[in-house]
Image (cartoon, rainbow, N blue to C red):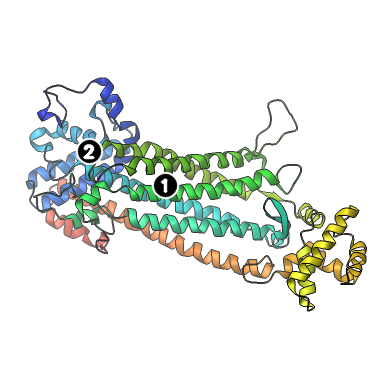
Amino acid sequence: MTDKLWGGRFAEDITQDVLDYTLTVDVDERLVFADLWQSVAHVLMLGARKIVPAEAARDLLGALLRLRDQSENGRLRLRPELEDVHFNIEQQVIEDLGREVGGHLQTARSRNDQVSTDARMYLRRVQLDAVEANLELIGELLGFPEEELLAILPGYTHGQAAQPISVAFWKTAHASLLLRDVRRLRGAFDRTDESPLGACALAGTSFPLDRQVTARLLGFRAVLSHALDATSARDYLIESASAFAIGGNNLSRMAEEIVVWSGHEHSLVEVQDAYATGSSIMPQKKNPVVAELARGRAGRTAGTLVQLLTMAKGVTLGYSCDLQEDKPYLWHAIDAYLSTLRIVAGQTRGLRFDGARGEELCWDNFSTATELANHLTAGGLAFREAHHVSGALVSALIRRGATLRDTAASAEILAGLGHPVPEPVLARIFAPRTAVTGYTSPGGTSPRSVTAVRAELRAAVTAYGAWLEGTRRRLQRAHDAAFGAARDVADGADLGKALDRIAPDLPTLYGDLS
């Protein structure tokens, strides 16, 4: 008979090839903290409900605390022959206490509810880290100097110059975009922050569990009550992967503009030397490699989303090993997303925009032609007719090899079209800076509008920052309370009294949301 923890009905062990193919210890290292924490919560509940003897609960908690100390000191190693983090922790408890006592650890618990609980606990950390990294990047974007309110850039549609904007307007646009990533992450957090522990394999158990107390000990704000749903669900992982993929795409779009605008043909922005590299053969090159990699690594987050959707689509309710293919890809996406957020924040801090170059390009690419149409419309002409007149002016100037800088030629052409405009008026309305300051509608490019938007975005950042800090405090309090109670009981305290002592530090559940 095999000596595996699950091996009672097996006459022979799996081969090394099968073990190598099925083990997950290489990706489970990130879950050690969660598996130890949930094991402590589980044993506290088992002892409080008298499902295991008080003395066994005391010994189990002592063994788990010893493993936690080893983990924090870097001495806890997951052994590949034990397949995954759950069997590693259980086996090491059994080796410490013997099977008669250590064998109680898995009472009323399955690897199916364990792995979902661990993954949710780890993912909560990641989601909060991603919120923090986004808020830091948004802060960099919103921290622009006042002169960037009038530092001119060409705005683009269809890849073609469209209308003048300011550097501050561009930065607040990306900040606004990233703030939606924060909102997505917070929403994903809410649906991740539900405890599946106690659902067991898929159908619950005949033991009188208290799933609410374990949820509170683990810092969850709700219990996912339906056992089959709790063990089968992977939508919270897919939703998180979607948030990471959308966030990666948003970072990629910003990176694309940095790459294109830093080229000589545009010369609108220069990245700090620390975020660029040179060429192995061309000494003049300065390559914006951080921006290029941010673009490329968005593919990792997008690919993970597709992988998870494909993995889950054919799996019926109840656990199947297909589902263990979630973590290797998700871990890569998490690492790519968080590292990109953090390095892009550093790059953003050192970006140097050339507003004079931006203004020059706006003069030469007819980007204020709309202002002539608006001027004529304000004078009583229907906008569609004014649009036609402005287009005819642009066409005539192009044929002459002229631009809107040539106000004398523009005045002559407009007079010939039957819509004369004095040259001094044209010089004013064609100036890119006039357009930027004149777009005073809410959300527009004017300094007043951009300043108002920045204030709104900063207020949202402050609110999300407060939520982030409060949520981390809640999880830390629950963590400290659970391990504090475990240590008290291991040292001889009454288990019921230990739980009563920590009750004020545990979150209040807001109910089942299934």
Using the rendered image of the protein, determine whether residue 143 is visible from the camera's viewpoint: no
Check the image and report above or below for 2 versus 305.
Answer: above
**Depth check: 256 or 42 in front?**
256
Quadrant housing the N terminus = top left
How many numbered discs, if any? Answer: 2
Residue 368 location, quadrant: bottom right
Image location (x, y in percent) of residue 341: 52, 47
Q: State left or right for residue 300 relative to residue 437.
A: left
The residue that label 1 is drawn on is 241
Task: Using the numbered discs, state the Cα–Cα distance from disc 1 to disc 2 in whole angstroms.
Answer: 35 Å
Q: Residues within 10 Å of mark 1 (few under 14, many from 20)?
A: many
Residue at 22%, 45% (x, y): give it. 113
Image location (x, y in percent) of residue 14: 21, 23
* Amino acid type assigned to the residue bearing label 2 in the image: Arg
Quadrant housing the C terminus = bottom left
Element carrying mark 2: helix
Q: State left or right for residue 176 relative to residue 359.
A: left
Q: Nearer the viewer, mark 1 or mark 2?
A: 1
Image location (x, y in percent) of residue 467: 41, 61
